[in-house]
Amino acid sequence: MIGWLDCSAGMSGDMLLGALVDAGVPLTVLQSAVDAVDVEPVTLHVSDVVRSGIGACKVDVQVADSAATRSWSDVRGLLEAATLDEPVRALALDVFARLATAEAAVHRVAVDDVHFHEVGALDAIADVVGCAAGLVHLGLTSLTASTVTVGSGTTRGAHGPLPVPPPAVLALLSGAPVQAGPVAKEMTTPTGAALLAATVSGFGPLPPMSLLRTGSGAGGRDPAEVANVLRLVLGEPLDSGAADALLLETNVDDLDPRVWPGVLQALLGAGAHDAWLTPILMKKGRPAHTLSVLCAPSTAEALRELVFRQTSTLGIRSVPVGRAVLDRSERVVEVDGQRIRVKLGLLRGEVVNAMPEWEDVAAAAAALGRPAKDVLRAAHAAATALPPR
């Protein structure tokens, strides 16, 4: 499943929370993730509203009074200590890291010394963690967005008056298509910009898709000039004639084989869908390997450069290939008190594959003093018995 965000009215964390709930993500998914962070009580309240005749979901983050001032290192510690699924934690950390880097550049301070003020407040922590949980729950294979309306005029922050768009928003959306829009107000917040920067793979019009459902998340204002909603459109991609993926390949016969594990790890870390080696026999009977890298067309150039820099090859061939994938999500099961992550493959919402993470299985087996195969069997049984969510 793929997604597209219509940011013609801007982008904020609470707007994305509303769009996710309106698109079918259970509120309990968002609230449970927020509850996992050890801060003052935070409640997500959902209501239906109308913006310029369009019905939308509005999520209000209700927080207790708090005098806590939180730096980036404080927020990072909270997220690292929270009982979150790893993909949710990783995405939330990425969003806040981008915010911290942008704010540090604006205020000319060290990243760890950034005090988020509005951004680090409880409602922003809830926005980021809740949105991360909702997006991970959807298991999208790609998320793109329209041109982003950022607003104009001035606003007031913790340091005083700020121009709109705020400097942090411009830093976070570097390279993205933006426009002021018809409303002289702040339309895209730093939190919203950081969420876009961390989750969107590209910008443009609605991509070809077989439409499944949409969700509309409302902003707090109701201006006359624009329907103040963020729309999330979900669907299955259509074959547009372009390759779903590229297969990059090269034959190498003169590289120390001890180098290959690091090369494969680097390729996967740089965004390859998969990377593997195949033993071959080349001319004059020389043993060699074929390096194969499956990737999105958008990441091919960076991956080619990585292969050139880390191997001894002089050339790489590219082959367009089709690619069909299951929707994916990650859950956690317990075997005798040991937590084990499980990757789930879903076909139209039905779990058809469940595979425990081997590193977690091995660690659990060592802790329990049991054979790894027994722990693997128990984790798989627990995974297949998980209720849908």
Image (spheres, helix red, strand yellow):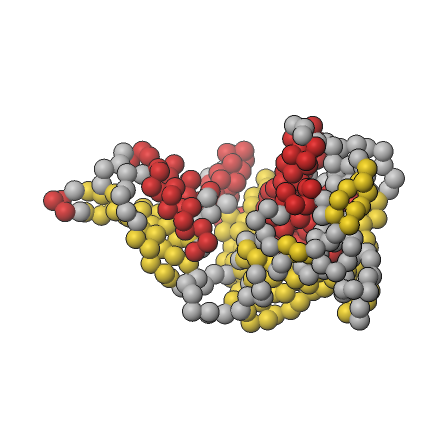
Left or right, 69 with respect to 313, comes to right
Q: Position of residue 344 (x, y in %)?
A: 54, 55
Q: Is residue 5 left or right of residue 117?
A: left
Q: Quadrant of the C terminus?
A: bottom right
Q: Residue at x 53, y 58 (%)?
A: 141
Camera-side residue of 210 and 134? 210
Q: Is residue 316 above or below residue 263?
A: below
Q: Relative to residue 189, is residue 6 depicted above or below?
A: below
Q: Depth check: 303 or 387 in front?
A: 303
Question: Residue at 46% of width from left, 42% of height from top?
Answer: 269
Q: Quadrant of the N terminus?
A: bottom right
Residue at x 56%, y 43% (from the top left corner): 340
Residue farthest toward the right in the current orientation of the protein: 65
Identify the residue at horizontal 43%, vertical 56% (top origin). Answer: 297
301 sits left or right of 96 in the view? left
Horizontal and vertical percent position of residue 262: 38, 36
Residue 124 visible within the image = no
Residue 8 at least partly seen: yes
Instruction: Residue 157: give x, y in percent of width and height.
Output: 80, 40
Q: Would residue 277 be found to the left or right of residue 298 on screen?
A: left
Q: Nearer the viewer, residue 20 or 187?
A: 187
Total numbered labels placed on residues in the image: 0
The image position of residue 264, as x and y in percent, is: 38, 42
Residue 63 found in image quarter? top right
Up-down: is 146 above or below 248? Answer: below
